[in-house]
Image: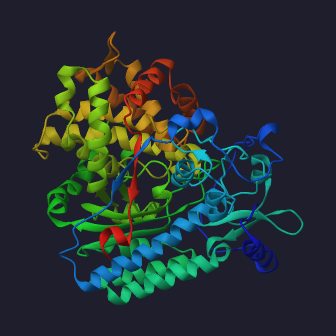
Amino acid sequence: MTMQNSKKLTKITLAILFATTALTACNNEKQLTNNQTPPVASEATTNITPSSPALIPEFQNRLNIYKEVTLSADLSHLSANQKQVLSLLIDASKIMDDLFWQQAFSQDKQTFLSSIKNAQVRRFAEINYGPWDRLNGDKVFLTHNKTKAHGAEFYPEDMTKTEFEQTDLAEKDGLYSIISRDTEGKLMTIAYSEMYSDEINRAAAILEKAATFADDKEFANYLLMRANALRTDKYQASDFAWMEMKNNPIDVVIGPIENYEDQLYGYRAAFEAYVLIKDLSWSEKLAKYAQYLPELQKELPVPKKYKAEVPGSDADLNAYDVIYYGGHSNAGSKTIAINLPNDEQVQLEKGTRRLQLKNAMRAKFDTIMLPITETLIVPEQRKNVTFTGFFANTMFHEVAHGLGIKNTLNNKGTVRQSLKEHASALEEGKADILGLYMVRQLLEKGAIAEGKLAEYYTTFMAGIFRSVRFGASSAHGKANMVRFNYFQEKGAFSRNKQGLYRVNMDKMTAAIDSLSELILTLQGNGDYQGVDNLVASKGVISETLTADLARLEAANIPVDIVFKQGKKVLGL
């Protein structure tokens, strides 16, 4: 595996000398069956020097796809101690940002960026955490760089899937370790706490210092437990502690969390961070929805055995202003809602916490969603695209992660284990479709008082156009394309001669129910081949849709947002 500098090489050498076969990481057991090998870089992209990379001409029109917005919030209600905590959490988040660079790209961050002469191109590389356009199928946009490895920097560059699957290796599917080679060239695991020990210890010390300023005892306890988790690679206890916090006005999501960057297997978690300020009034309005989860689980349009699990009753919904993104959360498209923890045991016992990032969500709606609506939705349905619908669809997407099934019905382990690299895409597709299902059910129950069904459906349709512009290579991108093509096949929407789209309410409802059943069944059966076939047949962008997306580009509608953020922006 390529290391960034001599310091990292030293760490690997020490790890090889002293690591045992039982390094600390996540204890998941998986059976691996896919024998495909990762893509090999073309001859034109190998044996090159890393000096003076330049923009590949075809990407010239991609440099302005991000709209910069200032990430700020009202801090006037916070105490001096709380502001000190925020300052320290931003410091720790910057370390997560640096760690993600190491996981995503082999070259040293500062060396790489300083080698790019053009400031606009350098900024684009900074946004993408490397030389690959994350919203365009991870295509290489700089000369002297090769195809992005599906396994990022989590696995040796020369490792094949066959070699990996035939190796008897402890923690080979662990969330919190990388795969490297020992002195004899054999595969070995190295725990994150060992691989990134310097950065990990600095971040943990900052969290411990922040805990001394925390006014809320539960929050202070969480910070201490999270610091310990970083040092030991054991995160479950801190996840439980995070779920038990209810009254803290500020929050932080920090550590190796999502596994989207590992597109080879979907095993390894990437470092990221969000620093958050709770919107108490909005959170109070959202609190009532979590209580409906057990009832909605029972009503899912699928046979009983696929909905036998009972969602945790301690889940909650909250709205936040996010004031800092770091690492994976800041790479390419920006997250506007969070559903955590990912640990299946925590989910079953406690549920999850759904965090709606209100200020980031509003920025995307105003700068992207409304212009898309004017360009692609029929005039008579444009009034149905509202921030209320956008907020609710995004929120219930996160809530819907708690529905369905986490463990297969045929002893194939968890859904995440059995579906491997397809697990994330199918889970995102499930959350999207069940989120819409939940909105319909809650409207019928009178639990949602605002808006009408047409508002949520049409906003969702406009949202698909926003999301598919992220490309079809990511988990979210694949989920969007599967859903778009499925809806089209079922007549849930139509496209007129002017290239404008209209939602068919009745057919949309039927398509939501049938796709929900299909996804939940695939998950419950742990049907890897079935999901592989679904993604292969429907996870693609058609020529017609490509042309429609080009109209959005011609109208100079941003693809996503990027932040001006940090202590100076906040006055800290």
Residue for point 26% across, 27% down = 374
Residue for point 18% across, 43% down = 388
How is this picture coloured?
rainbow
Query: How far from the left and from the top, in percent, is residue 437?
Result: 28, 38
Query: How far from the left and from the top, in percent, is residue 315?
Result: 29, 62
Q: Quadrant of the C terminus?
A: bottom left
Q: Do we see residue 241 in this rendering? A: yes
Front in this rendered view, residue 558 or 105: 558
Residue 174 vs 374, above or below: the answer is: below
Query: How far from the left and from the top, in percent, is residue 121?
Result: 56, 48
Q: Quadrant of the N terminus?
A: bottom right
Give the residue furthest to the right: 184
Front in this rendered view, residue 453 or 154: 154
Residue for point 36% across, 36% down = 302
Q: Is residue 523 left or right of residue 86?
A: right
Front in this rendered view, residue 562 or 52: 52
Q: Is residue 191 left or right of residue 73?
A: right
Residue for point 51% across, 38% down = 62
The answer to which quarter of the image holds residue 515 is: top left
